[in-house]
Amino acid sequence: MQFSTRVPAALEDNALARAVAARRAAKKTIYDLTLTNPTQAGLDYPTAEIAAALAEGAAAPYSPEPLGLLSARKAVAAYYPGCGLDAVDWTCLHLTASTSEAYSLLFKLLGEPGVEILAPRPSYPLIEHLAALDGWSARPYPLVPDHTGVWHLDQAALVAAITPATRAIAVIHPHNPTGWIANGADTHFLLDTCARHGLPLIADEVFLDYPAVGNKTCAESFASHKSSALTFTLGGLSKSCGLPQLKLAWIHTGGPAELVAEAQARLDFIADAYLSANTPVQAALPKLFECGKKIRGQIQRRLEENYAVLAGLTWPKGLAVMPREAGWSALLRRPAAPDEEKLALKLLERAGVLAHPGYFFDFPESGWHVISLLPEPKEFRVGVEGLREWLPKLV
């Protein structure tokens, strides 16, 4: 049998994944610095409150609604000012099962197979795979670090990346894994560039709630901007409330009224074909956002505590922790390695430490490690101390 969808080469022969599976099968300890699943991070979930909200939601009658239940969309709109952001219009919201699905609906809305989306690099390897599944391709535009380790948008390179096949520009805000926040000049540049070229902007804001403490800038949602470009802002329970298992996300459509009206009408039709956001979670959403505040507070404290440990260590020459602006990750700069996968394998074998080397996120050059700040503090400390001990010996 011949299948139409090719598995990415990185997944066909992943030596690191096989080594992790073998180590777990042998019941050997792994200090996992790649953990991004909050339900496995030792957080104190208000399970009774969540269960009660879902039980009440499960009793709600099924009422299919392409945009999502009215009560749920109003709950999403109320979430924005509850997080210190400007209010958004609930009539401009569509609910989906995930932000991944939201991308897919937008790909169907914005172009036929064969076109492309511009997406930042380095970045978590998702958009290119989602684009490929809808027949699109992803063309990168660069984010670059300055001499202090703070990342910035290369505005000229983004404009140069636009081609006749470009149908949208994606921005991850705050960015994963660099923590870059699009504020001020970058925000206006992105919106003005999209308006000038007649392109919609897709703003993925799943990490919006997690700025670094003391950061002089705070991530402002693209949904709160009065933009001259058609703008789709994505968010969801997975990160904002630490509830990935409940599968609910949203698209906010903003921009010029005539463009918004046409986009929403077409998006209604596409969403009506799927109706994927389940009724119990939608009906429970106002109470789930309340539960999410408790979970989000724990996550924020965990990120702060672990980053303080990471940044507070004395690192050997050639190793340096980069400043953190936002998000769930931290970056460690190190000497370049000729084979980053072999380096990761040696770290796993010698120290029991699993950490993502930069190639996983398409960093343009060797010499980076991406470290999740979500693991339990004791495991995190042992893991990063393992990095500090073994990286100088292995690179």
Image (cartoon, rainbow, N blue to C red):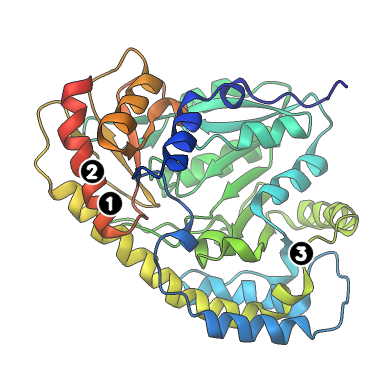
Q: Residues within 10 Å of mark 3 (few under 14, many from 20)?
A: many
Element assignment for label 3: loop
Q: Mark 3 or mark 1: name the one nearer the start of the chain.
A: 3
Decide if residue 220 is on the left or right side of residue 201: left
Element assignment for label 1: helix
Name which residue type carries label 3: Ala
Identify whether 270 is placed above or below 387: below
* Label 2 sits on residue: 384
- What residue lies at 72% left-to-right and 50% top-to-bottom? 101
Residue 11: image quadrant is: top right
Number of residue marks? 3
* Label 1 sits on residue: 380
* Label 3 sits on residue: 277
Identify whether 95 is placed above or below 324: below
Q: Residues within 10 Å of mark 1 (few under 14, many from 20)?
A: many
Q: Is residue 32 visible?
A: no
Image location of residue 286, percent across then percent down: 62, 81
Q: Nearer the viewer, residue 4 or 318?
A: 4
Q: CA distance from mark 2 to mark 3?
A: 39 Å
Dot 2 and dot 1 residues touching (CB under 8 Å): yes
Dot 3 and dot 1 residues touching (CB under 8 Å): no
Name which residue type carries label 2: Val
For the residues carrying marks 2 and 3, which lies nearer the camera in this image? Answer: 2
Q: Mark 2 or mark 3: name the one nearer the start of the chain.
A: 3
- What residue lies at 40% left-to-right and 68% top-to-bottom? 43
Name which residue type carries label 1: Phe
